[in-house]
Image: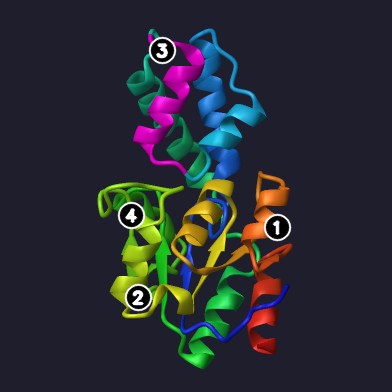
Amino acid sequence: MTLVKQPRAVVFDMDGLILDTEALYREALRAVVAAEGHEMSDELYGHTIGLTSDATRTLLAAHFGPEFDFDRCWSASSARFHEMAETQLCLKAGVVELLDALDQVRLPRAIATSSSHRSVQRHLGRHGVLARFDTVVAQGDYARGKPHPDPYLLAAERLGVSPGDCLVLEDSHNGVRAAAAAGMMTIMVPDLLVPTAEMHQLCVRIVRDLHEVRDLLRAV
């Protein structure tokens, strides 16, 4: 499948799409959970990708049991992640080139993330790309996080563009579900999660990286 029309705006996820954060998050959370006597499998971690911290709390409590101290593990894993991020966090391939291409055609763009505004400002600011987005929708801005459509609908509203005219770029299953529920054209750029039959059905395209997204937009 290809894009059915030229989008009037592009909405980006952040973690795993713009920033190579997910592998670091997984390593940090796995180490902390192991110290508590539990195992964080790749499959379990995959289910958390794209979720807010509250939704992750519910998921892990259901998996590990009510005695699981989520707040302590979340705080410890966050500290561990930020320590690693100081030297290991980097932009994903093609981010800058895609933003340059969007500048050339003057397409507005937004971030819609399950992370906090503080995380967005810290990480995107450090890499010099925060100012290249017209608006940021982050945790606390919406009632229901991904896989609900609320973050993406709010991003479209802030951009002043109809949801059906927005193109969403996502790496997670929960994010793709959210964008599809919002009625937006969606491209999946896989990071840690393998595209499933459901993802192929919900997306207009699944690509290798953001360079391919840039080329696709140029071809529309």
* Mark 3 burial class by Cα count in 10 Å: few <14, some 14-19, many 20+: some
Specify the label residue 105 is tagged with: none
Tag 3's secondary structure?
loop
**Position of 138 relative to 130 (above/below):** above
Mark earlier in primary sequence (2, 3): 3
Q: Which segment is the magenta one? A: 51-66
Mark in front: 1 vs 3:
1
- Residue 213 coordinates in the image, percent (x, y): 65, 73
Mark in front: 1 vs 2:
1
Question: Which residue is labeled 1 in the image?
Answer: 200
Cβ–Cβ under 8 Å for marks 1 and 3 = no
Real-space Cα distance between discs 2 and 3? Answer: 39 Å
Mark earlier in primary sequence (1, 3): 3
Is there any visible trace of residue 193 in the rendered image? Answer: yes
Mark in front: 4 vs 1:
1
The quarter of the image holding the N terminus is: bottom right
Cβ–Cβ under 8 Å for marks 1 and 2 = no
- Residue 27 coordinates in the image, percent (x, y): 58, 31
Question: Which residue is labeled 2 in the image?
Answer: 134
Q: Which amino acid does label 2 sit on?
A: Asp
Of residues 12 and 84, which is closer to you in this image? 12
Real-space Cα distance between discs 1 and 2? Answer: 29 Å
Question: Which residue is labeled 4 in the image?
Answer: 138
Mark earlier in primary sequence (4, 1): 4
Q: How many numbered marks are there?
A: 4
Tag 4's secondary structure?
loop
Tag 1's secondary structure?
helix
Question: Which residue is labeled 3 in the image?
Answer: 68
Real-space Cα distance between discs 4 and 1? Answer: 26 Å
